[in-house]
Image: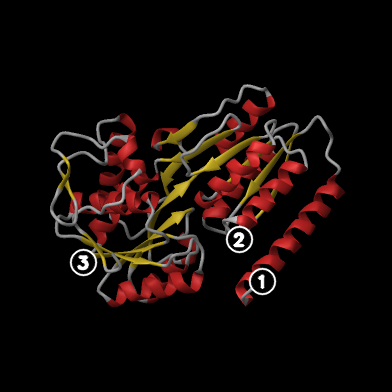
């Protein structure tokens, strides 16, 4: 076992001990709906786990609800042990909030048929397992409009985690939004192969700035790309939550999550025995996805353009992935007048023209 694996195991053991002790101290009543949350990164003050925890707090405010959570749980076998420990404690509803928790969630769910599991960003279901996500690509398109309108170099940088459909779909939507206001825009991508690694995120942003990017976007959990942009006098677009306080001179807007209403709804359905397994993919109209307030440097006409596009997306007058859309090689992927199906979007593994990915 290497040092990293040993440290991860030690961290997990301490987390499980803490969870068991905390749970025992609380001595929950049997009439409470007990809800668990598993996060893959620290809650902190910003980012993915922070946005998820805002949703947890909304559930905790419900009469008769009690919540527990664990953060920084690695994907894979470690997450299975944590999910199983929560199920063994008799929780009625467990949210597993990272793509890599999908298979562990399904495995544990088989052994606890009376527990409801909701997995975020996956695609598999079971009688007691549902999945949910938001059409974040819609918000990405809007932030692309802002980034494209603010860029002088016509090069946008994008710090990304893993080359999976969710991330690729977001990069493509961001690029299409930018191209809608400036057809000469290119988007350079730097991969970190990690959801949360502040040091790598900062270095990736700096490498993009070195290659001429004057706006940095991200599919990452920390605000380090924002800070890197501000340090170089560039602009930035955040993700997960409003990151403006970390880079007030750079932050244009952010693609953000608002999980509270959905989590409250699901908890109420479980409590009333009305929950049924399903796959939820909610757009701007639901409020689950949105954009953060614009920074003061964004001109009013550009703000108005983005808001108009938002209204068109909500009203169905605008669909992000409508043809003609070509890929990097110039091959037509979405024919003129056609729109990509949800099936195609969920399996998207190709980049639109305008994306420059040095690693692929």
Give the residue displayed 68% in from the left and 52% down from the top. 81
The numbered dot on residue 152 is 3
Are dots 1 and 3 in contact, CB under 8 Å?
A: no
Q: In the image, residue 269 lies at what x, y percent?
A: 62, 26
Report the quarter where the C terminus lies.
Answer: bottom left
Q: In the image, residue 338 lies at what x, y percent?
A: 18, 34
Report the quarter where the N terminus lies.
Answer: bottom right
Q: In the image, residue 308 lies at what x, y percent?
A: 27, 39
Helix, strand or loop at label 1? It is helix
Helix, strand or loop at label 3? It is loop
The numbered dot on residue 42 is 2
176 shown above or below 206: above
357 shown above or below 346: below
Q: Foreground residue, 295 or 142?
A: 142
Q: Name the residue under label 1.
A: 7
The numbered dot on residue 302 is none
**In terms of sequence position, does the residue under pointer 1 or pointer 3 come before the other?**
1
Q: Quadrant of residue 55?
A: top right
Q: With 164 as the anchor, is 187 left or right in this view?
A: left
Cα separation, mark 2 vs mark 3, equals 35 Å
Give the residue displayed 69% in from the left and 27% down from the top. 271
């Amino acid at each position: 076992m290497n040092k990293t694996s040993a440290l991860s195991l030690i961290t997990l053991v301490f987390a499980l001990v803490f969870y068991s002790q905390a749970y025992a101290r609380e001595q929950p009543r049997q009439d409470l709906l007990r809800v668990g949350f598993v996060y893959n990164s620290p809650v902190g003050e910003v980012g993915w786990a922070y946005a998820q925890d805002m949703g947890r707090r909304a559930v905790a405010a419900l009469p008769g609800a009690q919540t527990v959570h664990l953060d920084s749980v690695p994907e894979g076998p470690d997450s299975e042990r944590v999910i199983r420990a929560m199920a063994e404690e008799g929780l009625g509803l467990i949210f597993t909030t990272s793509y890599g928790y999908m298979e562990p969630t399904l495995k544990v769910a088989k052994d606890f048929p009376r527990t409801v599991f909701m997995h975020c960003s996956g695609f598999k279901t079971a009688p007691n397992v549902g999945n949910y996500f938001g059409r974040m690509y819609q918000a990405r398109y809007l932030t692309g409009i802002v980034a494209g309108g603010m860029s002088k170099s016509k090069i946008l940088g994008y710090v990304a985690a893993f080359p999976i459909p969710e991330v690729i779909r977001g990069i493509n939507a961001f690029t299409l939004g930018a191209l809608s206001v400036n057809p000469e825009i290119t988007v350079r991508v730097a991969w970190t192969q990690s959801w949360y690694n502040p040091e790598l995120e900062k270095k990736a942003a700096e490498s993009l700035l070195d290659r001429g990017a004057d706006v940095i976007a991200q599919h990452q959990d920390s605000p380090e790309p924002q800070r890197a942009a501000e340090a170089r006098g560039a602009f930035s677009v955040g993700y997960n939550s409003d990151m403006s306080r970390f880079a007030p001179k750079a932050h244009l807007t952010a693609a953000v999550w608002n999980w509270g209403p959905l989590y409250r709804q699901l908890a109420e359905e479980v409590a009333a025995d009305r929950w049924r397994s399903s796959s939820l993919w909610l757009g701007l109209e639901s409020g689950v996805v949105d954009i953060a307030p614009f920074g003061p440097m964004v001109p009013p006409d550009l703000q108005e353009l983005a808001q108009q596009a938002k209204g068109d997306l909500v009203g169905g007058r605008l669909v992000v992935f409508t043809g003609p859309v070509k890929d990097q090689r110039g091959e037509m992927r979405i024919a003129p007048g056609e729109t990509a199906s949800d099936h195609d979007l969920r399996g998207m593994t190709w980049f639109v023209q305008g994306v420059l990915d040095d690693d692929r």
